[in-house]
Amino acid sequence: MFETLSQRIRAAVDKLRGRGRITEADLKATLREIRMSLLEADVNFEVAKSFVNSVQEKTLGAQVLESLTPAEQILTVVYEELVQMLGGESKQPVLKNEGNLWFMVGLQGSGKTTTTGKLANFYKSKGRRPLLVAADTQRPAARDQLRILGEKIGVPVLEVADGERPETTRQRLQQHLTFDYRDLVIVDTAGRLQIDEPLMGELAKLKQVMGPSETLLVVDSMTGQEALNVSKTFDERIGVSGLILTKLDGDARGGAALSARHITNKPIFFAGISEKIEGLEPFYPDRLAQRILGMGDLQTLLEKAKAAELEAPDKSIKEITLEDLITQMRQIRKMGSFTDILGMIPGMSRMLPAGFQVDEKQVNRMEAIVLSMTRKERRDPKVLNASRRKRIAAGSGTTVQEVNRLIKTFEDTKGMMRTMQKQQGKSRGMFRR
């Protein structure tokens, strides 16, 4: 989502690299470009102004102007201010041993019901026993959607009836909990296509009767500045304890996501990063700031690898084969898209061309090619003559040219790995001396 913003900020700062000492005019020109990049990314005007003023205040001193590495120092200040703009330290909803009742509120289409299911799945994986409550008394389809999600993740769902009164819902919930103990109840409340008085009245009444310990507002990151107006209205009328941003994997400019914390003064608890049921992560301001500035996100990458239970490569293997290649590709896929994974590797964004995206369909074709080979062919591609390559192309639904490209890429990769191993061997020999 923040690809364009990331490129613009890095390009502005990179102009100062290798120039030695800079002038105040140089610095102000750089900050002007950063301000424009924020506004073009749909960041709220007041937020962008405050951000740049704060960066300017901290960088106009002699320490930066007389530094031999002004770009690095400015980038450090920009990073620190980005973290503050996004909320500073990471925060999570208060989770007690028992008596946790959370309200999910938001407009229809923001991803509220899906996020409710994701949240239950997240806490179930942490050892909690969640219960979902489908509390939309006017839209049976919303209740059906949550029931299907509950079945998918193995979490029970208590459904309200059409027109059911809040007092009745509370009574039914208490009865349910007497015979099926749950330490986290997540209530999916009614949504509308737009904010209206009936919606607010219904939510206010339900909240008064149910007494939730947390009220979480689900905000669509792709709706721009309107998302901020929605957030403010919900907080003024209902009272919100925190935000969940959805669709952070989308292709919108992302300004609303960057402005949400500053405008609402509410912490961002979670971020939706994919449509999968596992696609919900705790929100870390420092990690998002690192990714925006092209610094990678090694911590999240390691956590994804651990969650995917990736197997360590077999150190006894002296030379990689196509079988190893396909195994590694499948393991990486457990962690998410190849493009996202590359973006988390520190320094990788600078090595890749602007707008680089891994074609997931091409990855599928590569896998199909390897799977169309015999075991002998996967282990020793040198046996692949013209007739074998033609057979593999037909079996994988690709072309002989694509088979040839895969084999060439594979051989080039092996050559590069051999070179790296030789260099490592020389380095070890130097240290032994």
Image (tube, rainbow, N blue to C red):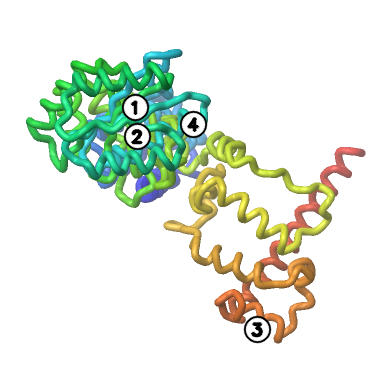
Q: Which mark is residue 390?
A: 3
Identify the element where label 4 is drawn.
Answer: loop
Within 10 Å of the Cα at label 2, are there few (<14), some (14-19), or many (20+) other Cα atoms? Answer: many
Q: Where's residue 143, x and y in %?
A: 27, 39
Separation of residues labelled 4 and 2 (CA atoms) = 50 Å
- Disc sitting over residue 121 in the figure: none
Compare marks 4 and 2 and give the one earlier in the sequence.
4
Which of 43 and 14 lies nearest the eye of the viewer?
A: 43
Residue at image position (30%, 49%) is 252
Left or right position of 154 against 160: right
Q: 280 or 410: nearer the eye?
A: 280
Q: Nearer the viewer, residue 233 or 120?
A: 120
Q: Quadrant of residue 53?
A: top left
Numbered label attached to residue 186:
1
Q: Amino acid at mark 2?
A: Thr
Q: Are marks 1 and 3 in contact (CB under 8 Å)?
A: no
Disc 2 designates what residue?
Answer: 116
Q: Residues within 10 Å of mark 4 (few under 14, many from 20)?
A: some
- Residue type indicated by callout 3: Lys
| Of pointers 3 and 2, the one earlier in the residue sequence | 2
**Mark 4 and mark 3 residues within 8 Å of each other at the beta carbon:** no
Measured as percent of width and height from the top left, residue 280 is found at 42, 37
Q: Position of residue 214 (x, y in %)?
A: 31, 20
